[in-house]
Image: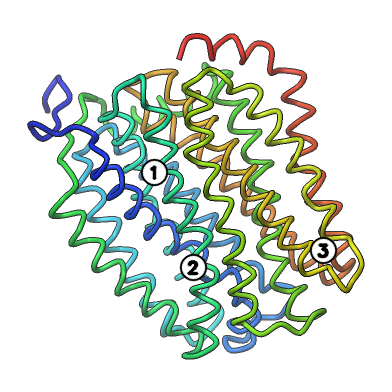
Amino acid sequence: MSSMPHTAAGTTMTKGLAVLFAFCCGAIVANIYYAQPIIELIAPDIGLSSTLASFIVSLTQIGYALGLFFLVPLGDLLENRRLMMVTTAVAIVSLLSAAFAQTPNLFLLASLLVGFSSVAVQILIPLAAHLAPEQTRGRVVGSIMGGLLLGILLARPASSLIADHFGWRAVFGAAAVIMALISVVLATTIPKHQPAHNASYGQLLKSVCSLLFTQPVLRQRAFYQACMFATFSLFWTAAPLELARHYSLSQSQIALFALVGAIGAIAAPLSGRLADAGHSRVASLCAMLFAALSFLPSLVHPAFAVVGMAVTGVVLDFCVQMNMVVGQRAVYALDAKSRSRLNALYMTSIFIGGAIGSIIASPLYDHGGWPWVVLAGSAFPLLALLVFLKTGASESRSFQHP
């Protein structure tokens, strides 16, 4: 293996390539979220109880976390484009399995594999950071994260609309077709990149654990965003249940509601620019504070509750996205040669938080209704904020040396 990193000759991070990266990231990450608004349709069809329905979402996120830990570090060892092609092929098979599953065990296994195989997005992002000049790295990563968040947010309305008109199985069939198209795009347009790392896979995983213990900024940023993403997943898993059961909204109406949340994607480029300008601490402080307060509009008079919930969704998405991009820039700045492993640890922690939020969504809603969701949703970012205020001083000094 080469002792020097090698990227296809003449490859630089142009605006066109950044847009392509953003599109691929959005399309791939959407796989994790298609099931979120339609668990009410899937669960009875495959014989899963309503209390266990949110396991569909949480197992997908757990699978994604496993893929992040065990597959993404290979981005520092293997040729990146080939690795992404393999994971995308597994995603196609997993999505088709979900589309044709007739039993809860098969569908839950397919959900786990859909998450596990959708980690190509987290190989693309460090590759973009590698190709981008340091002075614009935050902006480039922010733009690509905007595409990723759009994929997350648009997956829900697309899923609801398709399920409403063609059934929930068509959602996963369509996703498999999209992944087939993405594999062609990856094969023909993404530059090859051979990392410089020469360690074995075992040594690579050992070094991942070492990074977790030796990088306090990584641990802090991972914890903050895990709390934020727990709230994000909790809201977007419970909100469709509240809208369908309490307000009798159809899947198409829920799709429009989810579409409003896509407004939060504008946070990505903005937060990247704030990070590049040295305002990371202020951006994170505001993100955590307003995320903790974001559930208040959903408690207004029942006549305006749906509008209030939409406001909650927009504000929460904005805050979660802002904190994620700022955190990624801080993490990527720690060690250029370890970006894939640093990103794997950061994102694994985030999706563990997301899985926790999804797991508790259905039981919380079934036993305490929307007020219990509000309490839990506000508690996660508040906890992150308290830890940030306690430990953020040491982290803020690291931002002076990106």
Residue 235 lies in what quarter of the image?
bottom right
Q: Are marks 3 and 2 in contact (CB under 8 Å)?
A: no
**Residue shown at the point (68%, 57%) measured from the top left:** 313
| Amino acid type, residue under disc 3 in the picture | Leu
Residue 364, disc: 3
| Amino acid type, residue under disc 1 in the picture | Ile
Q: Is residue 377 left or right of residue 279?
A: right
Count of numbered marks: 3
How far separated are the C-alphas under marks 1 and 3?
34 Å
Q: Are marks 1 and 2 in contact (CB under 8 Å)?
A: no
Residue 357 lies in what quarter of the image?
bottom right
**Residue shown at the point (44%, 34%) measured from the top left:** 343
Q: Choose the circle earlier in sequence order: 1 or 2.
A: 2
Q: Are marks 1 and 3 in contact (CB under 8 Å)?
A: no
Say if 65 sits above or below 89 in the image.
Answer: above
**Residue shown at the point (63%, 41%) measured from the top left:** 226
Q: Is residue 127 left or right of residue 391?
A: left
Q: Please provide percent x and percent y for residue 148.
A: 44, 51
Give whichever of 150, 2 is nearer the camera: 150
**Residue shown at the point (24%, 56%) measured from the top left:** 86
The residue identified by callout 2 is: 111
- Closest to the camera, between mark 3 and mark 2, is 3
